[in-house]
Image (cartoon, rainbow, N blue to C red):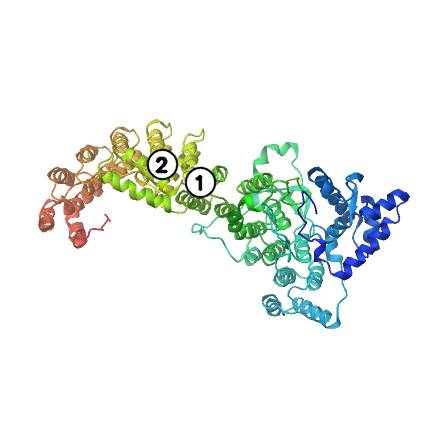
């Protein structure tokens, strides 16, 4: 029992065969008898602990062959865990009065079987001849020169091998012979370890207390083998990102790439990458181009490390602290971008379980989440804080594939209304990768939509109140209140809007522009129109922001987020369409007016008629098109305005006017009346070619 009564599960002594338990127990008691002081010797046997410095001879006595550095690593981890347990629940610690520099028998077994340490791969057990021959035969198949033979062995291992820890140990020993086997062989060995490893299972006869995790048993040899393959040195190396040739294709999808191992083998992006061990003072100004990683300690091949990460999907799950910690460490520090991608893919495959179980179920307040030495994260809050810190770090990765995966992982792992996570995702709207920006927008839209019931109820109430004549902004607020009361809350869905509204008033023009554009895109995708906070922010940006590009983004978002006929929104758009000095913004305002003006609205028609006098042809063309939608069929004012534009100097404006007249004038008179009004010979030829299409309601100007 350790750390407030929580049992060690990743490589606990319960996973040892009886033969090894007896061997370790006898060795432990003999080592305890070697103590010089008689009283200490008596207490060691009675209370079950020995001085921590005696672990080395004890490990050697039981026949486990590891280096002195590895012994010291185990000793340091055991004493750190014991000291923490003494600070949390001293009554549960054997021989607590002796202090932290002691080791119990359970500590000893934990150190030898925990996948953090290579010692677990050195523990043997007696094998029958039949079992030994089966392991040797399967190992030979995986070392066969033929890729087809090795692939078949990975895909379809013999049933007698699956779950055999000594078979895993045999493959691990071959996997770590880096100089003896080819890269392709080592890739297949790593995948095979994941395929034959014992799957995670709940410990029989164990029932978790409320607020604590269920005790689980994992294949410590498989975890240890794959973890050793992914081991990184503690020293930092720096990648010069200017030498990283990893350009994003124009049509890069939001979905993740599946065959990472083959991508790693064929990609040339890492061929010319330069790493350096330090930053000389004279190059300090180049720090912005240098990204920190760690050099691999065991396996130099990116493809093999990628396969090792993917192997965890078969022998670990979201409750394995060791693997979760390792994957997050790998996602930040491994220099191979496909390795980092694989780590994010495995984390994402578990993220639904992490979110559904929630922190209350996964973490007990007094227990630690993982026992490793990298940092002393113990409580659930610190553990979750670290998880989001890792995702935030990965968001700055030089590979766009990794950044995209970070967004998709956060989308699945977070609960609704997590403002910190939504802030990280919103920052990705400014990413240089199109796929990452699309993933961020999709994530925010899903977060705003929530589980859908609030949004759908609000939409119904909003439309009902508008039809009843309630002013639009008031209708939106009433609909939100009604939907929240009907559902018992909004699940913090609207935190997305709060995050984006705050970013609309950032010091950075780039941030303001991205946030203003995202409000429209996110609200449109989530079917969430008319939110008063979002619309007020957009109105403020259009009237007050000093940057034209930010104003244009807000104008374009207004028709996506607004409600048809809403007066305050239209007033701002009327002002922008007729008074703003920037032609492109005036054009955008006209296009938003087209979508938000109710058919036959006199104020809208008057504004669009005024825009027909604009000195820029693009604005006039947009105004003509908007008049077509805003006018009733046969409207005299709109008809006269469109006819006047048939004489415009721009052919594009004249074409739009001819098309508008066919839609405004009564059905029976369209072709004859418009044909007589077209201006020049080229207009008549164009009209004759397309007149058969002009009466189609979905026709858009060519």
Classify 198 as above or below 375: below
Q: Give whichever of 699, 482 is nearer the camera.
A: 482
Q: Residues within 10 Å of mark 1 (few under 14, many from 20)?
A: many
Question: Disc 1 on helix, strand or loop?
Answer: helix
Residue 334 seen in the current view: no
Q: Residues within 10 Å of mark 2 (few under 14, many from 20)?
A: many
Residue position for label 1:
429
Q: Residue 260's image quarter?
A: bottom right
Report x, y in % for residue 375.
Answer: 66, 40
Report x, y in % for residue 295.
Answer: 66, 46
Question: Disc 2 on helix, strand or loop?
Answer: helix
Report x, y in % for residue 131.
Answer: 71, 70
Sequence-wise first label, 1 or 2: 1
Q: Which residue is at 37% across, 28% downward? A: 545
Would residue 170 appear left or right of 257 to someone viewing this image? right
Q: Residue 281's image quarter?
A: top right
Residue position for label 2:
553
Report x, y in % for residue 671.
Answer: 11, 50
Would residue 548 appear left or right of 348 to someone viewing this image? left
Residue 425 seen in the current view: yes
């Amino acid at each position: 029992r350790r750390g407030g009564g929580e049992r060690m599960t990743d490589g606990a002594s319960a996973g040892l065969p009886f033969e090894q338990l007896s061997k370790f127990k006898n060795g432990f008691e003999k080592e305890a008898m070697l103590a010089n002081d008689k009283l200490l010797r008596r207490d060691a046997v009675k209370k079950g602990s020995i001085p921590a410095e005696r672990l080395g001879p004890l490990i050697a006595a039981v026949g486990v062959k590891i280096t002195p550095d590895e012994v010291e690593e185990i000793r340091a981890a055991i004493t750190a865990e014991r000291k923490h347990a003494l600070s949390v629940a001293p009554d549960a610690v054997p021989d607590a009065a002796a202090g932290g520099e002691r080791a119990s028998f359970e500590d000893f077994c934990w150190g030898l079987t925990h996948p953090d340490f290579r010692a677990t791969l050195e523990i043997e057990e007696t094998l029958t001849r039949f079992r030994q021959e089966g392991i040797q035969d399967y190992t030979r198949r995986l070392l066969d020169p033929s890729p087809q033979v090795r692939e078949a062995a990975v895909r379809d291992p013999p049933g007698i091998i699956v779950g055999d820890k000594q078979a895993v140990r045999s493959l691990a020993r071959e996997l770590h012979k880096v100089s003896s086997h080819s890269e392709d062989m080592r890739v297949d060995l790593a995948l095979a370890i994941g395929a034959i490893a014992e799957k995670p299972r709940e410990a029989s006869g164990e029932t978790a207390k409320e607020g604590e995790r269920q005790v689980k048993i994992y294949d410590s040899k498989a975890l240890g083998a794959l973890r050793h393959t992914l081991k990184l040195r503690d020293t930092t190396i720096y990648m010069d990102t200017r030498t990283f040739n990893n350009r994003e294709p124009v049509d890069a999808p939001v979905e993740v790439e599946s065959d990472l191992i083959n991508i790693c083998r064929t990609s040339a992006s890492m061929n010319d990458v330069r790493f350096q061990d330090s930053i000389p003072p004279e190059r300090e100004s180049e720090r912005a181009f240098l990204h920190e990683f760690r050099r691999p300690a065991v396996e130099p091949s990116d493809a093999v490390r990628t396969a090792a990460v993917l192997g965890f999907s078969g022998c670990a799950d979201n409750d394995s602290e060791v693997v979760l910690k390792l994957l997050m460490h790998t996602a930040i520090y491994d220099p191979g971008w496909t390795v980092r991608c694989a780590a994010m893919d495995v984390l994402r495959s578990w993220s639904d379980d992490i979110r559904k179980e929630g922190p209350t179920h996964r973490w007990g307040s007094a227990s630690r989440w993982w026992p490793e030495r990298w940092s002393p994260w113990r409580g659930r809050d610190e553990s979750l804080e670290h998880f989001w810190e890792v995702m935030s770090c990965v968001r700055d990765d030089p590979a766009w594939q990794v950044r995209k995966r970070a967004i998709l992982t956060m989308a699945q792992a977070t609960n609704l209304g997590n403002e910190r996570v939504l802030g990280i995702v919103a920052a990705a709207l400014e990413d240089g990768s199109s796929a990452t920006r699309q993933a961020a927008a999709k994530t925010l839209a899903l977060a705003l939509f929530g589980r859908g019931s609030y949004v759908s109820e609000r939409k119904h109430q909003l439309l009902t109140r508008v039809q009843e004549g309630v002013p639009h902004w008031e209708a939106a607020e009433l609909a939100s209140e009604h939907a929240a009361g009907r559902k018992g809350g909004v699940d913090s869905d609207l935190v997305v809007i709060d995050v984006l509204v705050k970013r609309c008033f950032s010091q950075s023009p780039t941030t303001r522009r991205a946030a203003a554009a995202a409000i429209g895109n996110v609200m449109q995708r989530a079917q969430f129109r008319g939110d008063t906070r979002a619309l007020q922010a957009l109105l403020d940006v259009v009237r007050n922001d000093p940057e034209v590009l930010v104003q244009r983004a807000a104008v374009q978002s207004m028709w996506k987020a607004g409600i048809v006929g809403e007066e305050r929104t239209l007033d701002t758009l009327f002002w922008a369409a007729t008074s703003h000095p920037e032609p492109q913004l005036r054009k955008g305002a006209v296009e938003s007016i087209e979508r938000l003006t109710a058919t036959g609205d006199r104020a809208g028609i008057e504004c669009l008629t005024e825009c027909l006098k604009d000195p820029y042809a693009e604005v006039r063309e947009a105004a003509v098109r908007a008049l077509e939608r805003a006018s009733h069929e046969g409207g005299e004012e709109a008809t006269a305005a469109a006819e006047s534009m048939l004489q415009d100097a721009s052919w594009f404006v004249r074409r739009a006017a001819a098309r508008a007249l066919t839609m405004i004038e009564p059905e029976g008179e369209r072709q004859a009346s418009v044909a007589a009004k077209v201006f020049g010979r080229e207009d008549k030829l164009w009209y004759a070619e397309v007149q058969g299409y002009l009466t189609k309601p979905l026709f858009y100007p060519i």
